[in-house]
Image (cartoon, rainbow, N blue to C red):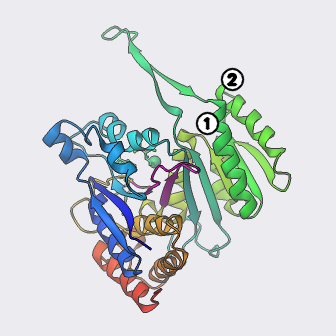
Amino acid sequence: MSAHRVAVIAGDGVGPEVVAQARRAVEATGVEIAWTELPWGSDHYHRTGRMMPADALATLRGHDAILLGAVGDPSVPDHISLWELLLALRQGLDLWANVRPAQLLPGVPGPLAGRAPGEVDMLFVRENTEGEYAGVGGRVHAGLAGETGIEVSVFTRPAVERVVRFAFERAEERRGRLTSATKSNASRYGYVLWDEVVAEVAADHPGVEVDSVLVDALAARMVRDPGSLDVVVASNLFGDVLTDLAAALQGGMGVAASASLAPGSDAPPLFEPVHGSAPDIAGRGVANPIGCLWSAQLMLEQLGEPEAAAALRAAIAAVCRQGPRTRDLGGTASTAEVGDAVVRAVEAAPVR
Ligand code: NAD
Ligand code: IPM
Ligand code: MN
């Protein structure tokens, strides 16, 4: 088989630090990858006035997957850096299904300590193209006392339906439970439509037990009774907020993984940790690479390399269990020391 073509956007802050470890771990599995390094991000913005070149989407379309570190730097306003890079990729490539697994990792300390790994195994499916991130709105009455910022949430039936169907299918493959998060007591339009679509699609999936929950109550339930949750489907913003909470429940921002997919299309899927560029710890070599390693593991699965994906998964679990661990998980190891340990664990169980 020819090498998989993977575009790497290491990006800003801790992005390059964690991506370097993910690349080494993928290489240790023996899977052949042709990496294309794309130096896009805030430095590129300072050099060129753009976060990425005008033909970036065409460049990316020539690849089988994208591995991204993080985007965001204190020297560039977030609404520029994110809208010109990360959100531009998700929306421009129509990567409509953002999949974020949340499981307890063996040995990782966290607020759910005491529960066995396996007891908490949630899969968040986040709508990734519209909703509260539609970019519709404007600023009016600038400079007046009543200056107003308007941000419109947009929910289209086709976009809601495709992500809800995708979530039902994932629930069918897992424990057969789907929880949909909305706020249709306070909303009168968008989430009401969302709830209707969920009820309609449920009729095609009689084997799935469906639960429509208000997002505030769901946040509490994630902490109080996470074992009751299997697949959770949510809008763009609710999915964003709930998956930071899920990351914290797993042990912290440094461990959570994410895949943005466009099922049925030939657009390259995007793999990235849930965390951001972490400017507070960037450049010190202390960032936890587990979230990025786990995202690369999702990438191997998506590239059709199940043995390599399983080997990397096992290596991540072994390192979580035995250490070394970075300081966010109570350890003292550097990013590279955790990466070294994962590489060694992959090499100890060669896949080919
Ligand atoms: P953040 O996720 O970068 O950091 C939040 C906290 O988690 C910080 O204390 C940080 O040190 C810690 N943390 C994050 N990643 C870690 C890691 N790998 N290991 C150990 N600790 C880690 O969120 P923020 O501070 O709100 O945002 C910083 C910048 O990143 C902003 O510009 C934001 O817009 C951007 N951002 C980008 C992405 C992305 O590229 N996918 C995601 C979220 C935020
Ligand atoms: C994430 C991030 C992004 C989001 C930001 C940086 C735009 O928080 O991937 O979770 O809100 O989707
Ligand atoms: Mn987020």
Q: Is residue 331 visible?
A: no
Magenta region, residue range: 257-275
How packed mark 2 is, by other alpha carbons closer than 10 Å (few <14, some 14-19, many 20 or more), is few
In percent of width and height, residue 129 lies at: 51, 38
- In the foreground, 110 or 214: 214
Looking at the figure, which quarter contains the N terminus? bottom left
Mark 2 near ligand 2 (CB under 8 Å)?
Answer: no
Name the foreground residue: 175 vs 120. 175
Tell me the tag on residue 188. Answer: 2
- Which of labels 2 and 1 is toward the front? 1
Position in image of residue 248 (x %, y %) = 50, 59
Judging depth in this view, the residue of 245 and 158 nearest the camera is 158
Mark 2 to mark 1 CA distance (whole Å): 18 Å
Q: Is residue 18 above or below residue 63?
A: below
Q: Residue 247: tell me if it is visible.
A: yes
Kind of residue indicated by mark 1: Ala
Does the magenta portion include 68? no
For mark 2, give the secondary structure: loop
Decide whether residue 265 is among the magenta residues: yes
- Residue 172 at x, y = what percent? 75, 59
Disc 2 marks which amino acid? Arg
Direction from residue 150 to residue 40 in the image, left or right: left
Residue at x 47%, y 90% (from the top left corner):
349
Vertical relation: 220 (above or below) 182: below
Which badge, 2 or 1, is on the more N-terminal residue? 1
Instruction: State the residue position of label 1.
Output: 159
Q: Quadrant of residue 120?
A: bottom right
Q: The residue tagged with tag 1: helix, strand or loop?
A: helix
Q: Quadrant of residue 154?
A: top right
Identify which residue is drawn at 54% across, 73% down.
Answer: 105
